[in-house]
Image (cartoon, rainbow, N blue to C red):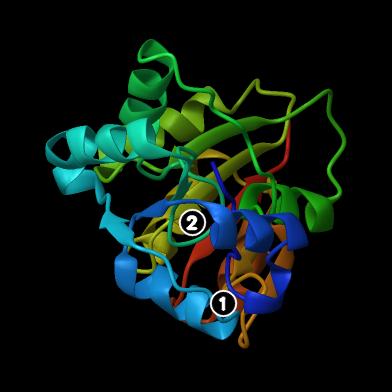
Amino acid sequence: MTATPIGNLEDVTLRALRVLGAVGAIAAEDTRVTARLLARHGIRKPLISYRAPVEQRTLARVLAALDEGDVALVSDAGTPTVSDPGQRLVDAAWAAGHRVAPLPGPSSVVAALSVAGYPGNGFAFAGYLPRKSGERRRFFESLREEHRPTVVFESPHRVLKSLAELAEVLPGRQITVGRELTKLHEEVLRGAVEEVVAALGGRARGEFTMVVSGA
């Protein structure tokens, strides 16, 4: 379980590079993305495509590779299984008697929390917001009495609409929005949700990680 950079390729850990160079194969969410990371650091290894749509179909191939030696599982960015493919493989690997080891590293969840600075006993992570407006609104309603900060992901196609709905359901709630974290065009906005919507000014490009403050 090898965490990879969420944007800036310099954020990869020394341990991750050592392991990626030592394993027999690498199971990757997108082999093209992983190939760029490996090329940057001069690593050549067999890559097994392990995308969410074909996770079940390629599971047997990865397990067969595990029978031959160590395999690193990587997603395009961040940590596998955290809103990324890998849950079935981890479960199957444990069931087959393999050792599953975490190699921690960059995390958009932790990065966003660190710059938000909201108080609270722990935090909640909800992954991607629901696609449907009604389901999103119900989710925002559930945060009315949530005293912990809540971290969510949102796509650029829906983020402006989602923030507008959040402002309607929880007016005045403090929120921190991280756009393109660690990348060239990184932007972090913090304030009442209405202020953040105004500051975005219709800009909805890139990947968004949002922290909604507790009640």
In the rendered image, the vertical position of residue 31 relative to residue 35, given as above or below = above
In space, the residues marked 1 and 2 are separated at their CA atoms by 10 Å
In the rendering, at what x and y percent does residue 36 appear? 45, 80
Identify the image quadrant of residue 68: top left
Visible residue check, residue 2: yes
Which of 10/175 is in front?
A: 10
In-image side of 139 versus 105 (left or right): left
Visible residue check, residue 202: no
Residue type (three-letter) at the residue carrying disc 1: Leu
Residue type (three-letter) at the residue carrying disc 2: Leu
In-image side of 46 versus 40 (left or right): left
Q: Residue at x 33, y 20 (%)?
A: 92
Q: Residue at x 49, y 82 (%)?
A: 39
Marks 1 & 2, CB-CB < 8 Å contact: yes
- Mark 1 lies on a secondary structure that is helix
Q: Residue at x 58, y 28 (%)?
A: 143
- The residue positioned farthest toward the bottom in the image shown: 184
In the rendered image, the vertical position of residue 158 relative to residue 141, given as above or below = below
| Label drawn at residue 163 | 2
In the rendering, at what x and y percent does residue 169 appear? 50, 39
Identify the image quadrant of residue 199: bottom right
Q: Which callout, 1 or 2, points at the residue further toward the start of the chain?
A: 2
Residue highlighted by disc 1: 200
- Mark 2 lies on a secondary structure that is helix
Which of 157/2 is in front?
A: 2
